[in-house]
Image (cartoon, rainbow, N blue to C red):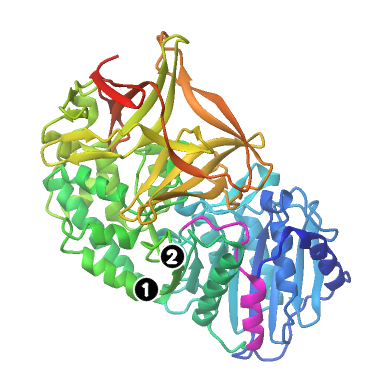
């Protein structure tokens, strides 16, 4: 259903054919508004998605294939891209177009403005409201998305500035009377990544009746505009829920047609029911906070559940952290720990999510993500605390990340009948760095920490190094969770089998991004034709095989997640990136090292491969809620002719 690269020239031609260059008058029709009348305001911030690939042009071409009736109009504002991949839209101006039964018309050309600024959004809303009112209105943000903290509409002409949630709300508030139960918009849609969150839903709960957005990164093909706009043209009498459902279904169909559906999500959230849901969500947080006040060891146990919850957008050192996890999956897994509220939040979530679709490797998705500090970054948390919904979780994270609460936090827990906070145990006070190891009769390394580990750690992983003493060089191969953990007694055993992940037979650096029951997700840093990317790789337990999903650029310094899932094509040049140092170096710093160069062929694949003969070092990596990390002593695996000898130390 989506266009191939060969159709790009046709796209520009189609735009040229349908654009009416006259600056058509933009006054509103004086006739009474009809129940079957729709106006959709389309905030098209092209960014690098348009500059580097014409993704916005492609979606416009899909839209223009539809013949709209007289009672449906789409009002479009363009900007945010340094170059548009057609001959009509200018990157030097902010332009406004109307697409209606007469085709596409340019109605206003303004000086270039920052699409990531709330004033630009507010002025567009004022223009659209005054000139193109309708009985039913919708609003679509088109661009990258960065979740609850990053926002959306990153403008590459203005340093990647984006609209944060409070800026979005301010713009709508400046132009509309906002009220629960009397929302002025039928739906707010995000054809972006990562915006189906508890906090986004809260932001728009008195703006629109429905939120249509994705929990996960969207593939570059995005929504299928011919599909949903064509359906609206055929039946303008539909409401926001019906249209949102069609947007979901046509999105899935479009992704399946081009092979991008494995990890997709899209949901329709009923914002008219959001306040009941928010109450349940806050009670969920209050039960967690109460447990933490009574027993600080709860924080580590709950953190381990969060680490095993489906997460979105990248949550490794290489990818960057969005700290967004699926709320329903979190609540299901925490049902024994939070029995008083987990069922209620699941019920409220189910009542709030009217419709959703998800790919085969996003089966835990329940429609809305919530913030959870997976990396222990206090600055990231501060950004969430200023924007997020639900007070209880804000104080819960503050307690877990800092061991303390503000005056407001202390007043909050005092209403819960707590007058003090407990002392939080962390890795900083345990002295577990270089903790000694044992080797059992089977050659497995064993780390014994005792039952205190259950009280402190949110994660345990293994790191694997290749060592070449003659060349005075060590190379980190990455981290994994391939170990046997007895959390009750604090005993951890490695599962080293002399194998690791490889691309076309070349060992890679790989980090685990999600550890599930049916599959694991891994991130593999590479240079793809000279540019930094992370290869997304899935290990499917049922198939007992790895699959390459594609490659994405890391989250940038502005919190922007890459919408483009770049597929490997024959002839691509991949350079594997590892991290290494001299064995004799006094510094602990590992520097990126380019190792192997691979030319992609139709047979290129990712697989578990034998490490071969040599020396390999393994270290247990311990993590706590505050982002502290400690490493055990080293265990050495020496492989000769396929035989593995294990000993402690190096």
Of the two numbered discs 2 and 1 in the rendering, the one whose residue sits closer to the viewer: 1
The location of residue 331, given as percent across then percent down, is 26, 60
Q: Can residue 176 be seen in this view?
A: no
Task: Name above or below for residue 412 compared with residue 494.
Answer: below
Q: Which residue is drawn at 76% across and 69% down?
A: 97
Number of residues whose C-alpha sits closer than 10 Å to that of mark 2, classed few (under 14), some (14–19) or many (20 or more) = many
Q: In this view, does 253 lie to the left or right of 416?
A: right
- Residue 86: in magenta span: no
State the quadrant of the C terminus: top left
Task: Name above or below for residue 327 compared with residue 404.
Answer: below
Total labels: the figure holds: 2
The location of residue 121, given as percent across then percent down, is 63, 60
Q: In this view, does 398 lie to the left or right of 319?
A: left
The one of 162 and 365 positioned closer to us in this rendering = 365
Task: Name above or below for residue 234 compared with residue 630.
Answer: below
Mark 1 lies on residue: 352
Q: Image quarter for residue 460?
A: top left
Residues in magenta, as a range: 216-234
- State how far apart marks 2 and 1 are (Cα): 10 Å
Q: Image quarter for residue 344?
A: bottom left
The location of residue 4, given as percent across then percent down, is 71, 61
Q: Is residue 93 visible?
A: yes
Callout 2–callout 1 Cβ contact below 8 Å: yes
Q: Image quarter for residue 533?
A: top right
Question: Does dot 2 land on a helix, a strand or a loop?
Answer: helix
Question: Does dot 1 land on a helix, a strand or a loop?
Answer: helix
Tell me, for residue 201, which label it has, or none: 2
Q: Residue at x 30, y 54 (%)?
A: 517
Q: Which of marks 2 and 1 is nearer the N terminus?
A: 2
Q: Which residue is drawn at 22% across and 57% down?
A: 334
The location of residue 44, given as percent across then percent down, is 67, 61
Q: Is residue 92 left or right of residue 132?
A: right
């Amino acid at each position: 259903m989506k266009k191939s690269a060969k159709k790009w020239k046709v796209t520009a031609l189609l735009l040229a054919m349908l654009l009416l260059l006259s600056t058509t008058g933009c006054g509103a029709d004086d006739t009474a508004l009809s129940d079957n009348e729709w106006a959709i305001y389309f905030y098209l911030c092209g960014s690098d998605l348009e500059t580097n690939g014409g993704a916005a042009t492609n979606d416009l071409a899909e839209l223009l294939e539809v013949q709209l009736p007289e009672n449906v109009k789409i009002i479009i504002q363009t900007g945010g891209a340094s170059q548009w991949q057609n001959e009509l839209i200018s990157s030097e101006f902010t332009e406004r177009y109307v697409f209606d039964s007469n085709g596409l018309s340019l109605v206003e050309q303004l000086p270039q403005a920052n699409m990531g600024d709330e004033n630009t959004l507010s002025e567009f809303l004022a223009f659209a409201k005054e000139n193109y009112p309708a009985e039913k209105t919708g609003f679509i943000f088109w661009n990258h998305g960065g979740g609850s903290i990053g926002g959306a509409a990153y403008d590459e002409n203005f340093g990647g500035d984006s609209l944060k949630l409070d800026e979005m709300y301010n713009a709508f508030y400046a132009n509309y009377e906002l009220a629960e139960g009397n929302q002025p918009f039928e739906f707010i849609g995000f054809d972006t990544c990562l915006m189906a969150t508890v906090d986004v839903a809260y932001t728009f709960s008195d703006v629109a009746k429905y939120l249509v957005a994705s929990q996960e990164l969207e593939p570059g093909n995005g929504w299928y505009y011919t599909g949903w706009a064509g359906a609206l043209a055929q039946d303008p009498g539909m409401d926001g829920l019906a249209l949102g459902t069609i947007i979901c279904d046509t999105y899935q169909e479009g992704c399946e047609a081009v092979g991008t559906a494995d990890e997709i999500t899209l949901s329709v959230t009923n914002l008219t029911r959001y306040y009941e849901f928010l109450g349940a969500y806050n009670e969920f947080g209050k039960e967690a906070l109460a447990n933490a006040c009574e027993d600080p060891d709860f924080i580590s146990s709950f953190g381990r559940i969060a680490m095993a919850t489906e997460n979105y957008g990248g949550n490794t050192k290489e990818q960057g952290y969005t700290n967004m996890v699926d709320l329903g999956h979190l609540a299901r897994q925490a049902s024994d720990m939070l029995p008083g509220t987990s069922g209620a939040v699941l019920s409220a979530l189910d009542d709030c999510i009217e419709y959703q679709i998800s790919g085969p490797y996003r089966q835990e998705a329940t429609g809305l993500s919530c913030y959870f500090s997976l990396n222990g970054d206090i600055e990231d948390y501060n950004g969430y605390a200023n924007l997020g919904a639900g007070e209880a979780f804000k104080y819960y994270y503050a307690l877990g990340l800092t061991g303390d609460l503000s005056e407001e936090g202390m007043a909050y827990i005092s209403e819960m009948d707590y007058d003090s906070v407990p002392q939080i145990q962390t890795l900083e006070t345990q002295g577990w760095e270089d903790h000694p190891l044992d080797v059992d009769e089977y050659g497995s390394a064993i780390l014994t920490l005792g039952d205190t580990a259950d009280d402190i750690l949110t994660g345990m992983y293994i790191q694997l190094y290749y060592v070449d003493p003659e060349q005075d060089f060590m190379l980190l191969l990455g981290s994994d969770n391939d170990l046997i953990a007895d959390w009750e007694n604090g005993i951890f055993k490695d599962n080293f089998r002399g194998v690791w992940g490889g691309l076309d037979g070349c060992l890679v650096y790989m980090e685990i991004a999600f550890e599930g029951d049916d599959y694991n997700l891994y991130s593999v840093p590479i240079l793809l034709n000279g540019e930094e990317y992370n290869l997304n790789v899935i290990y499917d337990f049922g198939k007992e095989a790895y699959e390459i999903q594609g490659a994405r650029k890391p989250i940038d310094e502005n919190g922007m997640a890459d919408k483009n899932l770049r597929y490997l094509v024959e002839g691509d040049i991949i350079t594997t990136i590892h991290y290494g140092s001299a064995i004799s170096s006094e510094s602990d710093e590992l520097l990126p090292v380019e190792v192997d160069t691979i030319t992609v062929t139709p047979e290129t694949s990712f697989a578990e491969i034998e490490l071969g003969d040599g020396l390999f070092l393994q270290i247990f990596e311990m993590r706590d809620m505050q982002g502290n990390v400690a490493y055990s002593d080293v265990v050495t695996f020496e492989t000769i002719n396929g035989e593995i000898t294990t000993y402690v130390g190096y």
